Image (cartoon, rainbow, N blue to C red):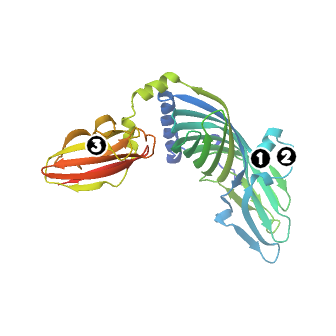
Amino acid sequence: MQNVRKPINPFKPLGLKPRSVLMRGPFVVCVMMIQLSIYAQTGSRWFFTLGPSVTVGNTFAGGQSSITAPDITGSHSIHPMFSPLWGYPNPQYSGLQNLGRKLHLGIQYERFFNPTFALVSGLELGGRGYIINSEFSNDLLVSYRTISLPIYVSFSPFAGNFWSFRQNIGMQFMYASSIPERVPGNIEIRQKRTISPQLYAGLELIHNSFSAPFGFELGYSHGFKNVIDHYYLGLDYVTPIAIQSTGSAFHFKIKYLFKEKRDPLKEKLMLAKFDEYDLLAYRNVKDPVVIETAFDTIHVCVEDDQTIDGDSIAIEFNQRIIQRDIMIQREAYCFDIILTENGNNTLVVHALNEGKIPPNTCVIHLYFGDERREVRLKSDMKNSGAIRFER
């Protein structure tokens, strides 16, 4: 078989193609993330990461997962590789690189803006690989080394007092390389160095402080192009069959927090923009009690329901706080509201505490014309009771 040498592409060592939309997109994302990290930072964390991976996205030429030569060697199939299964240390690699083929090792840097949002980057040394099962011969276990640069955003839909559940989404640049090797009648590995952009998504459970500095992450990186130049010779011991691998993989990481730094000034500036009443807007509003009325003005009186236990509330009407700190007592606290023609006319009761007996309960007396209505509402620190007036 005659080899044809392709013209040298000066962008190939970097894995780039001129006018490549695929590469321009990640470049723009990187610039935006760097700007975010410069102008919105409030602190940083450093992690050491360690964990195994499962490489997927491996096929024979043409996207086939199996090939066959019934009269010669039978069937051959290619499968994902669980990184700890990789065999003996390769003498051509350092001890750290050989360990990195079994367990991905990395340093992760996190720039956080508030307790729920952060920008994450770092450097990870590891490996990808595949397994070829043959019907009548020994199985092959082949890997190639990788260095990854992740860049992604991390946000917490749930942040507890000690542990936070986080969702990570972004991308990573993966550098893949193979050491040339040829096993006659078995496999031929040609040298290839490639930089490939990949999408990344993950779920993470992380502790909020040094008191228990371990976190755990399950992630997936998805590649789009072949990053190796490997050929399988075991089909008929003569004809090379190309093997393709995108470097896609599932990852499990154990993260150890070894350094943390906060910027108290920027935290204070950030907190100064919000007070406790602004944050009430993010609470869940329960299904409102519907009150029908033909009047424009409603006289509202609020008092505690049953036992007086120190409940305090704030009143929101039509998305605006109108009463800030009401201590609910036996003696009613009264005020007026004016209904609008086009507004939703919704009155929301937010709990500022839950008193001695949770949840926060109150009785609301409504007076309009000669009518009088009474509504009981329950609120807590996450959910708020509401009344909607319909005309």
Q: Secondary structure at mark 2?
A: loop
Q: Residues within 10 Å of mark 3 (few under 14, many from 20)?
A: many
Q: Earlier in the sequence, mark 2 or mark 3?
A: 2
The label shown at residue 90 is 2
Q: Residues within 10 Å of mark 2 (few under 14, many from 20)?
A: few
Of 142 and 126, the residue lying toward us: 126
Q: Is residue 148 above or below residue 70?
A: above
Q: Residues within 10 Å of mark 1 (few under 14, many from 20)?
A: many
Of 378 and 124, the residue lying toward us: 378
Position of 342 compared to 40: left or right? left
Of 359 and 167, the residue lying toward us: 359
Q: Earlier in the sequence, mark 2 or mark 1?
A: 2
Residue ID at (31%, 46%): 348
Q: Earlier in the sequence, mark 3 or mark 1?
A: 1
- Quarter of the picture containing the C terminus is bottom left
Give amino acid for label 1.
Answer: Arg
Position of 254 compared to 325: left or right? right
- Quarter of the picture containing the N terminus is bottom right
Q: Is residue 108 above or below residue 287?
A: above
Give amino acid for label 2.
Answer: Asn
The image quarter containing residue 329 is top left
Position of 358 compared to 151: left or right? left
Of 333 and 293, the residue lying toward us: 333
Q: Secondary structure at mark 1?
A: helix
Give the residue at mark 3. Answer: 302
Q: Is residue 333 visible?
A: yes
Q: Is residue 15 visible?
A: no
Give the residue at mark 1. Answer: 101
Q: Are marks 3 and 1 in contact (CB under 8 Å)?
A: no
Residue 273 lies, in percent from the top left, at 39, 29
